Amino acid sequence: MTTNDLFLRAQALSQRGEPYAMVTVVRVTAPTSAYVGAQAIVLGDGTLEGWIGGGCAMGVVVAAAMEAIAAGEPKLVRISNDQVQPQEGVEQHAMSCASNGTIELFIHPYSARSVLCVLGATPAADEARFLAGRLGIRLAEAPDHVRVVLVATQGQGDEDALERALSGSARHVLLIASRRKAGRLRDLMRMRGIGESRLDRLQSPAGPDAGAKAPAEIALVAMVGVLAALRGRGEAPVALDAEVSATAPVYGPAGPSASAPMQVAAAPAGAFVNPVCGIAVSIADPKHVEDFEGVSYYFCCDCCWTTFLANPAKYAAIHHRSTGRVSA
């Protein structure tokens, strides 16, 4: 395969989200059939495409590449029988070829677990994407077949974005939000039918408390959380504190239960639970009222109203499920 063929192959694998590693020979000592600049791709199943030297080195290279893909970390590999002092950051392997040459290779993995999707069109979302590029973290446009999703909507479609993220296969869903807001969104996700096993993937705040205020600062802190998740050091989802539990909307006569998912009760007297954001809206003083299939829906803001209008059947189903009503 030519260098161009390898790059096109790598591009196709990246677009499909398939794991692989790019292997490049960076140094050789004769005799060896490898040469500096020789490249190959090792696929997730161990298939090697390209050329990085004879069969004596191939087994070592494939095994090292598979380990790099699994760990999501690049590595420098030296295959030689020369007696040298161990070097930090260099993985040493014996050369089995009779030629007894030396090959050093750089292995750069591109694995599904190192893919990030950032949801949102906010300044913090843009900054997070920029930082991901600087860190070499591959970005995906959709939250499908990725390891981490960062929800950086910050009030612009939070509910739908979070539902989309939690409905996917990502192992970590990080939300840029306060604990109070995260608590309300958790309740709303339950209202929308998101199970507890998926909610366990949610972490908010997205990163450590550093007093971030500007979009760039918020994104930086969130990316610390993303990096921790990619490195396998992500913390367990942050539990809601007593203050949040006491002030967040309570759905169900007995509130949250450790043994059963939270259920959604009827709205308080004189109020209607907005199915878009889960907030109880006063029927006497709503901002918008919309009739759909014999039910009047009350909204507290323009955003929720327009979101409902875009897909009224979806939110009608949420309303019917939350109230126990079976639609015709």
Image (spheres, rainbow, N blue to C red):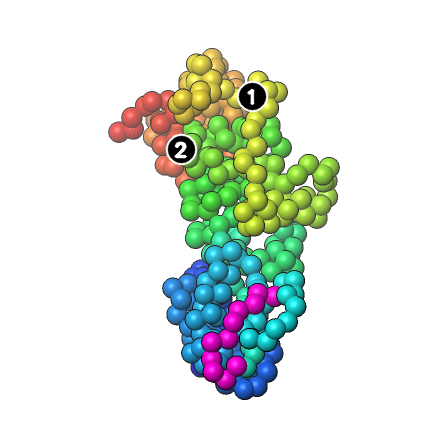
Task: Locate residue 23, reporting x and y percent.
Answer: 52, 72
Picture disc at residue 195: 2
Instruction: Work out whether 299 lies above or below 138.
Output: above
Find the residue positioned furthest to the left.
328
Residue 279 horizontal/vertical position (percent): 51, 25
Q: Quadrant of residue 48?
A: bottom left
Position of residue 265 relative to residue 139, above or below, is: above
Residue neighbourhood size for the residue with mark 1, other residues' Cα within 10 Å, grouped as few (<14), some (14–19), many (≥20) = some
Looking at numbered disc 2 in the image, what kind of residue is underneath it?
Answer: Gly
Q: Look at the image and tell me whether residue 10 can be seen.
A: no
Look at the numbered disc 2 and give the secondary structure of its residue: loop
Can the viewer see residue 186 in this picture?
yes
| Label 1: element kind | helix
Q: Which mark is residue 245?
A: 1
The segment highlighted magenta reads 90-100
- In the rendered image of this protein, does residue 294 appear above or below residue 165? above
Mark 1 is on which residue type? Ser
Q: Where is the N terminus found, in terms of image quarters?
A: bottom left
Q: For this rendering, which residue is in front, 213 or 242? A: 242
The quadrant in which residue 81 appears is: bottom right
Task: Identify the mark nearer the N-term, 2 or 1.
Answer: 2
